[in-house]
Image (cartoon, rainbow, N blue to C red):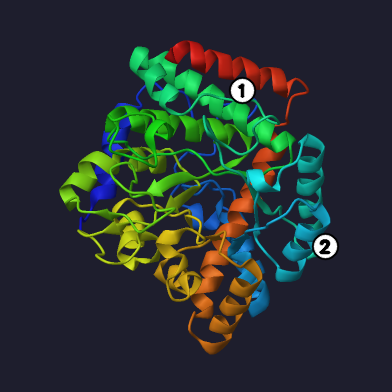
Amino acid sequence: MRTHRAAAVLTVVACIFAGCTSQADAPNGTVTDPTAAPSASAEADPNAPLGWGPNVGELEQAQEIAADMSSEQLAGQVIVGRYLGTDPTEVATMLREQHLAGISITNGNVVDEAQVRAMTAALTQASLDDGRSYPPVLGVDQEGGYVSHLRGIATEFPAFDAAGAAISADGESGREVVRQAAYATGLELRELGFTWVFAQVADVTIGAADPTIGTRSASEDPAIAAKATAAAVRGFDAAGVVSTVKHFPGHGAATSDSHDTLPVLDSTLAEIEAHDLPPFEAAIATHAPAVMLSHLDLTAIAPGVPASLAPEVYAMLRDDLGFEGVTITDSLGMAAVAASFKPAVAALNAGADLLLMPVDTVETHRVLTKAVDDGDITRERIEEAAARVIALQLWQQRAARRAPVPADVTTVAQDAAAALTSAAY
C-alpha cells in the first residue's frame, strides 16, 4: 500500500487544474468558495471549512447530535433506504419510523413530476417529524445518458462521455461547459426536492470490454476523466447539492457487471494507481463531499472480498488519498454483495458511513440496531459514520440557502444540456 501519496496528488492535480475557476463559484457569482484550506486555527474557528464541504462547527454540531442518538436512531442514520412503490405517504412513514438518513429514488418510484414533488416533500416532512433540524438524503441516479431515473421529468443531458469529448476538444472552455452542466443539473434536482445526486462517475472505461460503465465514463484517458470529474464536482457544489463520486477505486476496467456477479479485477496496484485513481484523486483535491465504493474483487488489495466490504480499500481512500468525507456503498441489493453475510454490518465495520439500498430496509435497520446493542458494531464507529452524514446534510442546507434556485431553472438546464452537446459533438 502506498504512503504519503495524498500530498503528491495535490501537487499533480494543482497542475492539472491551474487556471480553472473556483469549485464554488456559481455562474452568477452568488456562491462563495468553501474550498479554501483551513487555517492553522481551524480547530478554534467554527467557520473554518473542512476539505469536503462542512465547516468545523457543523461537524462538531453533528457529533453532538449523533452522541445523543439511541442505537435505533444511529442505525437509521447510516441507511439510505430502498423503497418499492410510488406512494409518498408509505415511504415517508418508513423513513420516520426507521429513522432513515434518507431514500434513494429510482425510476420504479416515479410516476410523473407532481408525484415526485409529493414524494420528496413527504420525505422532507417525515425527517422533520422525526426531530431533525437538517434535511434527509434524497438521492437519485441522474448521471445523464441512459442512467437518468427522472427521464421525462428533469432535463435530459448527454451521457458523461460528452464531458470528456468537450474537454478533449477545448480544455479550458470544455471544463466550464461541464461545470455548468453539473450546476444546472444540481439546481434542477433541488427544485424537485432532492438533496443528493448519485453522480458523477469517475471510472475510466476500457472501451468495448467494459460492459457496465461505457459511456457513463468521461474517457478512456485518465487525465481527461480526471478533469471532467473535478469540473462536475465543482458544478454540483455550487448548486448546493451533494455529489457522489463513484465507483471507487474504479469500475471501468472490470469485464463483468456487479449488478449480476462479483467482478474480479486482476489489475496490479500500479495499474490501479495509473489507470483508475486519477479521477478520484482529482475529485478529492476539488473537495468532493462523498465517494461511493464499488463491489469489486480487487485481487491486488483485498482478494475475495467486495471492495465495499474491505477495510483495505477504505484505508486506501482515506489514508493514501486523504479523503475525509462521507463514504457510501454502492447498492447492497446488487448480486455482488446481496448474498454476503450481514453485508450492512460488514460494510460499516470496514469503513462505510452510508449503506445504500439494502435488499430489505426495515430488516437491515433491525440487524444494525442489534449489532450496535450487542457490540458487533462499536458505538464509536456508528457515531463517527452518522456524524459525517449529519455534517454533510448541514452543509447541504447551508449551501442551498446561498444558491437559490432561479425561476427559469428549466431553461437554464436546457441551455446547459445543449451547450454540452454542442461542445462534445
Q: Identify the residue shown where x is 36% and y is 37%.
A: 282
Identity of the residue drawn at 43% across and 12% down: 425
Please, what is the three-letter code of the amino acid marked with disc 2?
A: Asp
Q: Secondary structure at mark 1?
A: loop
Q: Which mark is residue 129?
A: 2
Residue 121 lies, with reference to residue 278, above or below; the image says below
Q: Quadrant of residue 168?
A: top left
Q: Position of residue 198 (x, y in %)?
A: 54, 44
- Residue 164, located in which quarter of the rendered image? top left
Label 1 to label 2: alpha-carbon separation: 35 Å
- In-image side of 378 versus 110 (left or right): left
Q: Secondary structure at mark 2?
A: helix
Q: Which mark is residue 29?
A: 1
Using the image, determine if residue 383 lies above or below residue 41: below
Residue 113 locus on image (x, y percent): 77, 35
Residue 144 as seen in the image, left or right of residue 77? left
